[in-house]
Structures are given as C-alpha cells and as structure tokens.
Image (cartoon, grey):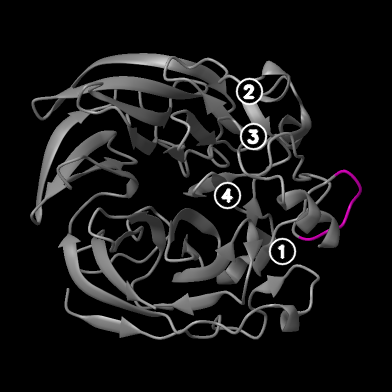
Amino acid sequence: MVRRQAAVVVAALAFSAGCSEATPSSSGSSTGPTSAPATTSTMAPAKTLKLTVASTVASGVEVPWGLAFLPDASALVAERDSGKVVRVVGGRVSEVGAVEGVKSSAEGGLLGLAVDPGYPGKPYVYAYFSGDGDNRIARITYQDGKLSDQQVILDGIPQAAIHNGGRLRFGPDGFLYAGTGDGSDRPNSQNDDSLGGKILRITTDGKAAPGNPDGRVWITKGHRNVQGLAFDGDQLYAAEFGQNTWDELNVITPGANYGWPAAEGISQLDGMTDPIAQWHTADASPSGIAFAKGYVFMASLRGERLWAIPVANGKRTGEPQAFFTQQYGRLRTVELAPDGSLWVTTSNTDGRGQARDGDDRILRVTLTT
C-alpha cells in the first residue's frame, strides 16, 4: 500500500417505485470489503452518508447498460441485448434508434454510451458494442431525436461471450476513455499489442490521444475486465471484475500495470499496482461507478448493492459502505445526474437475475452527507 500511495501522488492525468431510505449496512456477509494494507486508524472517521431512492425514473427497460446525459437533462440509455438506444425524459421512454451490427451474448452487446462534450455543436454519441468477432467503438450522429450516420472509429478489441469490458467516459481533458476486458484470453492483458485488458484513451476519431505512454491507444494494462470508470477532477478511478476471489477499485496512473493475470486483488507484486479496495466477488461483482460528494459509488451485480467508497486525491479515506443490499436486485450502472442525484439501473433481465415487476428500472437516488 505504501508503494501504491506514493505512486498515486502523481496519478492526476497530466495530459493537460416508492421512497426508500438506506443507511450504511454491512456487506451482508462475514467477508466484506478488504482494504489495502494500511491501518484504518490512519483514516478520518466516516462521514454520515444517507442515500434515498426518491423515485423510479423509468421501468420496463431491457437490460440497460450505458447511460449518458444530454445537456437538456434527459438521458440516452443503451439496451444491451436489443441494440436499441432509448431516451428517458420526464418518466417517458422513447426509442431513438439502434446501433448497427450489435451481437449480444452473455456479457456482450450494446454496452457503454458517451455524449460528446461539445454537444450539440458536435452532435455525436459514442457507443461501445460487441460486433462480428470483436468489440468496437462507434461515433453516431444524434440530431432531432434520432441516431444516424454510424462510423466505427476503433475496432479489434478482443471479444468473447464474457469479459468484454465496455464502459465509456469522457475525461476533463476532452478525450474518450474506454475500459476493456481480456476477452477470456488472459495473455491479452499483458500483451502490449492487444487492446484487451486495458484502459484506452483516444481522440474522437479513434486515434491515440496525445500524451499516451509510448504513443499507444491504451494508458494502462493488466486488467481482467474493466466495467466502471469515473473521474474526480483529473483523477480516474476504475472498477474491475475479479475471477473467483477479489473484485477491485483501482486508482488509474498512466503507464501502470494492474497485474492480471499474475495478480488478483492486493498482491504486492513488484512492478504491479494494487487496488485501493477489494471485495469478495459475492459482495460486489462491480460494473458502473460514479463520483459525487467525495465518494466513488459502485454498482454491484452479484452483490446486489450500491457501494460508497470515500476517496480524495487518489486515495481511499475511509471504509466502504453498502446501501440497498438485496433490495433491488442486480445493479449495473450508476451515473451522476445534472441535478446532483444518482441514476442507478437494475440488471435483473440480463439472464443472471430474477426479474421483478417493472424490471429493469432506473432509480433516482438522492444523497446527503
């Protein structure tokens, strides 16, 4: 942990329904989150955090995966299996189009979405999806409530029925970040010539962004399956699926190696960067993450809960807290809404959950500290 915290100092990306309240709960098992090897006594006492499910924004959405807000505070949502994109506004859900060439599987299909930071002057939406033999990132025009003119800007990302990654996020530097998986082929994560098991940083044309280490498309390697990306200012965090033992929350430092397949969780291996928190897979199996009010909020699939991890300046500042444990089923995506609330999607119709009336749904969660 000492080695990691020293590295984090330079981690800033120098690339210049009804109402439900929840208080923090335990992990739901006797083997909850485990910290990096630093004494808890060095951390500030946990702040009081209260999360409330204020409303159901939308229901009946089919396997919602990517979610991105537009300047008018409406949101575009990707349906993983159908390949459709829907717009959610005022409780209404309407289809705006479908991404061409989507091939769905156990974990593949239409995944992450991101809206161009220059929208509407640059009227583009970016989609990460599983195609015929690989995963791809496409730029799609979104105007007058419709998708059109799809162009693949990057392809060749390893694809399999599982371990496809898929999250997209624009950074404060204006470049597009993408989390990928190893495509069920472990050596991809350490192979510098593979886009699998990496975090990518690209221009809106799909080229390597200026300042990337060695001019590559990717900035980090050694990941198993990255499905969550979130920024606190310039600092990027990433959530990652473990195999059988440890899921991870990582602080991202350009050029770092996060260890897979040699390392899973905190391993203290030379040349490898350890996570700042880890969970047994039954308590997490994380997907999307978002940053707000000093916390990384992490949606958990198998764990069926929303984790809140206090962070500051690329370090964890307290113990993770769990909310809504087993209340809403599998949680896939969490995004910070323009009004300061969190939008959280369930994932109970994805073939691995138990669908409930109204699933899948998007929940609006308010937070106070």
Q: Residue at x 34, y 56 (%)?
A: 336
Mark found first going from the N terminus, 2 or 3: 3
Q: Secondary structure at mark 2?
A: loop
Query: In this figure, which residue is indicated by the disc labeled 4?
Result: 238
Left-right relation of 124 to 322: left
Q: Is residue 145 magenta?
A: no
Q: Amino acid at mark 4?
A: Ala
Which stretch did the figure color magenta?
266-271
Q: Nearer the viewer, mark 1 or mark 3?
A: 3
Label 1 vs 3, first from the N-terminus: 3
Badge 1 is on which residue? 245
Q: Residues within 10 Å of mark 3 (few under 14, many from 20)?
A: many
Q: Which residue is mark 3?
A: 198
Residue for point 59% across, 30% down:
15
The kind of residue on which mark 2 rests is Gly
Q: Amino acid at mark 1?
A: Thr
CB contact under 8 Å: marks 4 and 3:
no
